[in-house]
């Protein structure tokens, strides 16, 4: 999984294998929490995560926090994680330290009676490593991704015509350059029997844009016409970089780049459906799927991602599976028309990656599954700070 919505100006979190970090030093710096600067958040609200115990009449998600911590611990106990963390040794961020930090944080969550209790304990016991951000001063851009829910059919019909495909068994032997999106599915998405992928159709959707969005998000839950449900996840992709359709529309003067969100882009393409044939093929990258049999959406570490508690970062730079803290503005509301932004301090686990999530100044936040998650993810795009928390 992964990824604002890459469609627009950025990316989505397609699950990809975790690359070995290419540098010995993680781009994180110890933060002096007593020294406030104009570009940083207020010290008294940092690490005050009110969602854990519930707010605005909603139940807290402390169980989700613990489950997400456990997922990271599961990853850190794998041989693959040991290999990855050897590259971080000189930074002082070792696999053992990350693991001990998670175990200790878990105990603090269980023992704390309020957000303030947890905040005090975390500030007492943990060192805050601040991402240097894109500007070297800690400014990070936060976007979001989600797991969509769509109607679909197991068989092709006049209504359900747009397929999602399994990965070919011989995909590893395909010569490069790989076929482009247009070559695999046609400029109209209906190449069908003439496609190299004929016979690999996993499911059919009625809306071409929904089929494209499923590829962008890297997973989906499907309500099938026979009354059953199916969950699908990322299986692989062709060797092309992601191209933002939103940026392409803005470049051609079809939409203003300022204020461009996923709902704005979807609305434009819904009103101008003929434009799909022009713009979707510009993203030459193509994603394959597999059935996940109801399992939770999975991140690049091979463990489930948790709504509101998992993030995707550049895994060539940031410590996989580690406990992090994001401080930024996020949208909240029951509908797209009622969204309001609130400043939040949110404990998260770094468990995913994204093809457009590159550098220390980018974070993609997993909103969850379904329409409301999609509404929120589609308008998320705020600046803020990212910290990694490690035991002193």
Image (cartoon, rainbow, N blue to C red):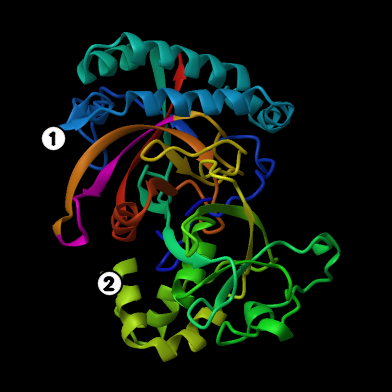
Q: Which residue is mark 1?
A: 56
Q: Which residue is mark 2?
A: 258
The reply to whether the magenta stretch includes residue 329 is yes
Under tag 2, what secondary structure? loop
Mark 1 vs mark 2: in front: 1
Classified by dominant secondary structure, the portion drawn in magenta counts as strand
Q: Is the C-beta separation of discs 1 and 2 under 8 Å?
A: no
What residue is shown at x 55% (from left), y 87% (from top)?
A: 188
* Callout 1 crowding tier (Cα within 10 Å): few <14, some 14–19, many ≥20: few
Residue 219 visible from this viewpoint: yes
* Foreground residue among 198 and 68: 198
* Residue 159 image offset from top left, x and y in percent: 48, 80
If you read the primary sequence from the N terminus, does the residue marked by circle 1 or circle 2 appear first? 1
* Foreground residue among 367 and 122: 367
Image side of residue 168 versus residue 346, left or right: right
* Callout 2 crowding tier (Cα within 10 Å): few <14, some 14–19, many ≥20: few
What residue is shown at x 52% (from left), y 59% (from top)?
A: 356
Segment tinted magenta in the rendering: 324-337
Image side of residue 124 versus residue 310, left or right: left
């Amino acid at each position: 999984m992964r990824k604002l919505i890459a469609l627009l100006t950025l990316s989505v979190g397609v699950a990809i294998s975790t690359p070995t970090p290419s540098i010995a030093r993680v781009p994180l710096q110890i933060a002096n929490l007593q020294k406030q600067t104009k570009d940083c958040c207020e010290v008294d609200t940092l690490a005050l995560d009110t969602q854990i115990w519930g707010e605005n009449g909603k139940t807290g998600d402390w169980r989700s926090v613990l489950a997400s911590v456990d997922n990271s611990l599961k990853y850190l106990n794998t041989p693959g994680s040991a290999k990855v963390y050897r590259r971080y040794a000189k930074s002082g961020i070792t696999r053992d330290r990350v693991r001990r930090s998670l175990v200790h944080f878990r105990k603090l969550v269980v023992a704390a009676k309020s957000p303030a209790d947890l905040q005090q304990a975390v500030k007492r016991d943990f060192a805050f490593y601040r991402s240097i951000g894109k500007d070297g001063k800690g400014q990070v851009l936060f976007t979001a991704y989600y797991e969509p829910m769509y109607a679909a059919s197991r068989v092709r019909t006049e209504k359900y015509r747009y397929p999602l495909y399994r990965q070919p068994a011989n995909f590893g032997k395909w010569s490069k350059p790989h076929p482009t999106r247009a070559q695999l599915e046609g400029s109209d998405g209906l190449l069908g029997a003439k496609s190299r992928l004929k016979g690999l159709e996993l499911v059919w959707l009625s809306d071409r844009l929904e089929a494209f969005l499923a590829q962008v998000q890297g997973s989906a839950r499907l309500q099938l016409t026979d009354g059953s449900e199916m969950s699908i996840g990322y299986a692989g992709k062709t060797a092309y970089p992601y191209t933002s359709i939103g940026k392409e529309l803005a470049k051609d003067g079809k939409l203003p780049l300022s204020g461009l969100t996923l709902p704005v882009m979807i609305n434009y393409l819904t009103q101008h459906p003929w434009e799909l044939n022009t713009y979707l093929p510009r993203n030459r990258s193509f994603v394959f799927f597999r059935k996940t049999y109801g399992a939770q959406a999975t991140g690049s570490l091979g463990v489930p991602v948790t709504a509101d508690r998992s993030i995707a970062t550049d895994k060539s730079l940031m410590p996989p599976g580690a406990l992090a803290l994001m401080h930024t503005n996020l949208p909240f509301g029951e509908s797209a028309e009622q969204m309001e932004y609130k400043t939040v301090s949110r404990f998260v686990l770094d468990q995913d990656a994204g093809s457009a999530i590159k550098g220390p100044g980018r974070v993609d936040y997993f909103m969850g599954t379904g329409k409301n998650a999609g509404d929120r993810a589609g308008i998320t795009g705020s600046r803020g700070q990212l910290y990694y928390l490690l035991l002193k």
